[in-house]
Image: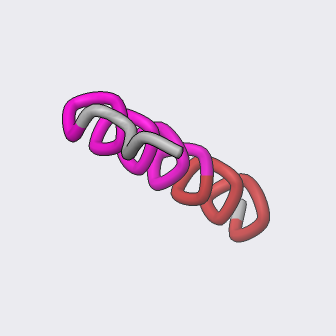
Amino acid sequence: MTLPNKTVTDSLKNTVYICIVKFTEACIL
């Protein structure tokens, strides 16, 4: 098993983070 590219991992984490933020904002509003 090869480790994913750091850029790919960072962008995935960023996408997940944005999704969580948007979801939280939707719940609050």
Query: Which residues, given as a range, are shown in magenta?
Result: 6-19
Q: Quadrant of residue 23?
A: bottom right
Q: Nearer the viewer, residue 8 or 25?
A: 8
Give the residue displayed 38% in from the left and 38% down from the top. 4
- Membership of 8 in magenta stretch: yes
Asked if residue 13 is positioned above or below residue 11 in the image, the reply reads below
How far across and how far down the image is residue 16, in percent? 54, 48
Task: Locate the C terminus by quadrant.
Answer: bottom right
Give the residue displayed 60% in from the left and 45% down from the top. 19
How far across and how far down the image is residue 5, in percent? 28, 32
Q: Residue furthest front?
A: 1
Main SS class of the magenta portion in the image: helix
Q: Nearer the viewer, residue 16 or 6?
A: 6
Asked if residue 17 is positioned above or below residue 6 in the image, the reply reads below
**Type of colouring:** secondary structure
Give the residue displayed 45% in from the left and 38% down from the top. 12
Q: Nearer the viewer, residue 22 or 15?
A: 15
